[in-house]
Amino acid sequence: MQNNSVTKQVFWFSLISYLGVAIGIVSTLFIYPENPELLGIIRTIESYSQIIFPIILIGASQALVHFYPTLSVENKNRLFLYSLYSVLVNSALTVGAVLLFSVLFDFEFIQWIWMALPLGIAIALNEVFKRQSLNLQKIALPSLFEKIIPKVVLPFIFVLVGMHLVPEKQGVWYFVFSYVLILFLTGIYTLKQDRTQWDSGFKKVFQDIAKKEYFRYSLYAFTGSLGSLLAFRIDTLMLGYLGYSMEDVGIYNIGVMIAMTLIIPATGIFAINSPVISELVKGDKIKELKVKYTENAKLLFAIGAVLYSCVFLGIYDLFSMLPAKENLLKSIPTLLVLGVGVVINMGTGFNSEIITFSKHYRFNVIAILVMIILNIGLNLFFVLVLDTGMIGVAYSSFISISVFNLLKTFYIQQKFGILPFDKKYLQLFVVIISVGIGVYLIPNLTSHFWNLVAKSGLCLGLNFVLIYKLKLIYQVNKLKLF
């Protein structure tokens, strides 16, 4: 019954995610390119909020998942309440810190930080509610709120601004308030599912959890989260600091947004399996962990690599048919470079989860620091020394993300003796690369539309048939289509 429940949640999570992606893709192709400057402003503010919210959380959401399985029902309730309490206290302290900073320093982007602050607080609180829903294996509806509401609100804002019905600044505030709405809806749903009981003595949870261990884990989780978000968001911030216009930032982020659609299948699998990975790691069930690690890594790599191949083969034809093709075509180099990084990230499987839920979680901090230093250093080298422009920022992110994931992979091999790679993984790699090269070498048709359909469709079909016939992925052959 539990497996059926998990499978159902993965299905609905993925379906909701793809619905959000569909809305996002339509908006990215038809709406955002009409006003890349507004997109650049919103993505910059969003990047600041992604740095603010882990500072507010200080690892509370990860600790909620990490310690939850070991507690009694009463203390599970207390841990959830304590997580909410700590986030509220940290939110107040963060507001005070930003206020003090704005008084003492003349910072060019301070108005965007003030906009990012309520957004960061809303995301932090929502993260606690969402993690509690994860513990309850009830992630589908919170995912609906998180994946769909911003995707609907953001293009609506662009339409309002484009029709001159609201000014840009007011439109940005509408985007911030959409996350407050997500928090409200997710909070109500989680409290109803959890049947949370108010317990004024929620700090008694530390009778079962060593306070020192809780705060040590939270601190390392916080460092890892902050570093990870900083590392993945630093490209947008670097463009601003290096003097690029908000229009350039917007065009760059069009490529980022399309590249990140490749990872959507991974988000559901990562989210739903987090408690399972935590249980396997804590129970020292290395054999079962290796099976799940390897099978899911192959599945995720196949999905990411096949989708990337289809994008690589058809993106020029697709963009060439669209009204805003001038701005869209400028984003292709960014999209293709970052897409490879996304595929590598997917193909290394549950790296972060295995390390985070083990006694070796401190290594995440080292890996993140390496990634940040490498990313910033490469940004400065590519842009300032080699004068490569925006594509240099993309190369910096790709290289640092790849090093980050491979570093974690080999660390897991050292500590657990397992790798996500096996003989069939190599065969899978060869199949997907061979199909991609073969289809690419086929002469192009004169019609952009038919070239897109023919090459992307052939790539998708050939990969699926070969993967199925060669029995390279367990989950695919479970479908029993032939």
Image (cartoon, helix red, strand yellow):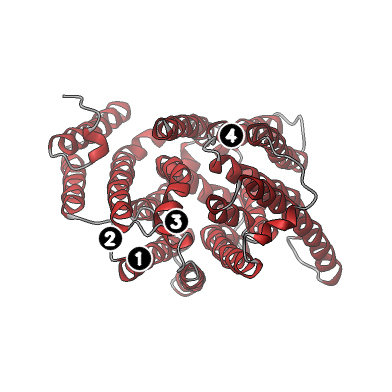
Whole-percent x, y for residue 219 in the image: 61, 67
Furthest residue toward right? 103
- Whether label 2 touches label 1, CB < 8 Å: yes
Task: Work out whether residue 111 or residue 445 is closer to the camera in this orientation and state it.
Answer: 111
Q: Residues within 10 Å of mark 2 (few under 14, many from 20)?
A: many
Whole-percent x, y for residue 439 in the image: 19, 39
Indicate which disc residue 314 carries.
none
Give the residue type that dot 4 points to. Lys
**Viewer can see residue 331:** no
Task: Work out whether residue 208 or residue 188 is closer to the camera in this orientation and state it.
Answer: 208
Pointer 3 residue: 353
Q: Residue at x 77, y 38 (%)?
A: 167
Marks 4/1: CA distance?
Answer: 36 Å
Pointer 2 residue: 419
Q: What secondary structure is marked by label 2?
A: loop
Indicate which disc residue 412 carries.
1
